[in-house]
Amino acid sequence: MKFPFFPRIIATSFGAGYWPWGPGTAGAVVGFVLWLPLVMTGHVTGTFIATLGLIVVFTALGIWSASVAERFWGPDPSKVVMDETVGQWISMLPLSVFATAACPFESVSFWMWAILSLILFRFFDIVKPLGVRKMEDLPGGIGIMADDILAGIYGAVILALCMYFFS
């Protein structure tokens, strides 16, 4: 049986999971790139709500597609990176408010905070402290997605604190 296209394209974050050098980072970068048009609108509420919507929709699709992917590629396959895309969106939630309200997309500050959100998310995703690793014990696609959701929450909290104290 062939791996169906739709769950494969979702699980791999539109193909980023096939990147041979750090597919998880590629998945996070896809999240950032897909998010840029939202923040470029300059609309604070719309950007925040749309980001939340992306998180909810692609968490559900990610759980489903990761579960399908496990049947074809085995447990927690490295090509499944929708979890990193969603985790990155979560990590950028504070930036979605700050960037449109106080720091325009074109500014150096925006890009500094954006890069920090990526670094923080990837740090928590790779190191897996404070219960992040425990989330992987959940079954199927839920476990695949849950550790990155928690890593994204930790990244968002640290980013928000940094933005509050250093802006």
Image (spheres, helix red, strand yellow):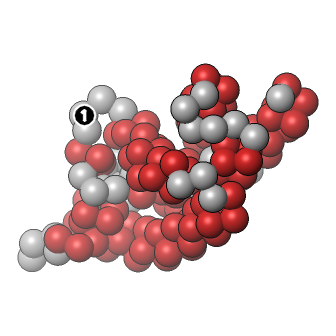
Element on which disc 1 rests: loop
Q: The C terminus lies in which quarter of the figure?
A: top right
**Residue at 75 percent of width and 40 percent of height:** 102
Q: Residues within 10 Å of mark 1 (few under 14, many from 20)?
A: few
Residue identifier under label 1: 20
Residue ranking furthest to the right: 165
* Viewer-proximal residue among 37 and 161: 37
**Residue at 52 percent of width and 67 percent of height:** 54
Using residue 143 as the reference point, say whether residue 166 is left or right of it.
right
Using residue 80 as the reference point, say whether residue 133 is left or right of it.
right
**Residue at 66 percent of width and 26 percent of height:** 109
Residue 53 rendering spot, x and y as whole percentages = 57, 72
**Residue at 24 percent of width and 34 percent of height:** 20
Residue 11 rendering spot, x and y as whole percentages = 34, 62
Using residue 3 as the reference point, say whether residue 150 is left or right of it.
right
Name the amino acid, label 1: Pro
Residue 121 rendering spot, x and y as whole percentages = 61, 40
* Viewer-proximal residue among 7 and 109: 109
Q: The N terminus lies in which quarter of the figure?
A: bottom left
Q: Is residue 54 visible?
A: yes
Residue 62 rendering spot, x and y as whole percentages = 43, 68
Residue ranking furthest to the left: 1
Up the image or down, 108 lies above or below 39; here it is above
Task: Say how many tags the image has.
Answer: 1
Up the image or down, 8 lies above or below 152; here it is below
* Viewer-proximal residue among 167 and 150: 167
Q: Is residue 114 visible?
A: no
